[in-house]
Image (cartoon, helix red, strand yellow):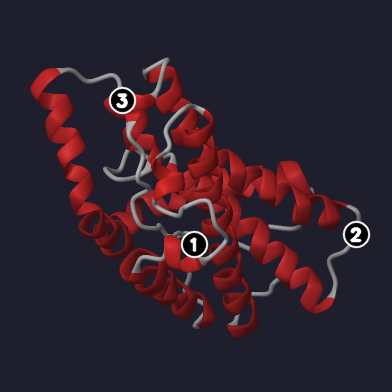
Amino acid sequence: MLGLQTIGPTFALFIGMGLFIGLTVRELARAHMAVRLGDPTPRLWGRLSFNPKSWFDPFGSGLIPGLIVFLIAMSAPYVPPFAYAKQAPVDPTYFKHGRRDVVLVSSAGPAANIVLALFPGLLLRAGVSDGRLGQFLVAVLIANLSLAVVHLLPIPGLDGARMVGLLLHGRAKQLYRDLDAYLPLFALAFFMVFGLVLGTPVWKVTVTLCHTIAGSGIC
């Protein structure tokens, strides 16, 4: 899957670092967007910080990415790199423009990951692709693009589900929102079962974005 033929323990470690950096950036982006749109909750809960303690989830930010890193280290990346953080304390009742503001907050995370991916991508396009630095740049690029794509899926608890929820009404909308509490189960199902089905299209989108940013032959 990777043009640089770098799958192995070192590359897996770099993928883990890329996920950690990506989660920090995406959670800060979502928190800052919510505050900018009038919701003080993220600031009151201490989410406007680079401190991982504010967003780290033992399962979504620890176990799941740890298992993915292990699989990549064993040259068996059967699911795309992904992770998630603790649910951000966002209160939509503070938003002045309702649905528009929910979409802006929900898209802030994936947008931040794509912007972050531009930096290593442009360096790789410029020819920085040799040695450990090249591996690290590819890993950060792949990890952040994969985070953006996965979090846009309509899986309850992720950004995509929040936007899909805006299209629902009444009982269906409430039931869909209530499923957010079961994100760990959905993440596990994605990892253990759905990854075999959804993994391929997610990888294809991720690699297409990678080629667009960094050029062909990188991913």
Q: Outermost residue toward the left?
A: 171
User: Measured from the top left, where is residue 194 in percent x and y?
Assistant: 29, 54
Q: Outermost residue toward the right?
A: 126
Asked which secondary structure carries label 2, the reply is loop
- Quarter occupied by residue 19: bottom right
Q: Residue at coordinates 52% horizontally, 51% vertically from top-left?
A: 48
User: Measured from the top left, where is residue 52 in percent x and y?
Assistant: 49, 66
What's the CA distance linking mark 3 and mark 1? 33 Å
- Quarter occupied by residue 46: bottom left
Asked which secondary structure carries label 3, the reply is helix
Q: Residue at coordinates 54% horizontally, 66% vertically from top-left?
A: 20
| Residue 35 visible at all | yes
User: Measured from the top left, where is residue 214 in percent x and y?
Assistant: 77, 50
Task: Quarter of the image for the N terminus: give it.
Answer: bottom right
Q: Dot 1 corresponds to which residue?
A: 81
**Mark 2 or mark 1, which has the lower sequence index?**
1
What's the CA distance linking mark 2 and mark 1? 24 Å
**Looking at numbered disc 3 in the image, what kind of residue is underneath it?**
Thr
Tag 2 near tag 1, CB within 8 Å:
no
Query: Is residue 166 depicted above or below 205 in this figure?
Result: above
What's the CA distance linking mark 2 and mark 3? 48 Å
Q: Dot 3 corresponds to which residue?
A: 93
**Mark 2 or mark 3, which has the lower sequence index?**
3
Q: Dot 2 corresponds to which residue?
A: 127
Report the mark closest to the observer, 3 or 1: 3
Q: How many numbered marks, from 0 up?
A: 3
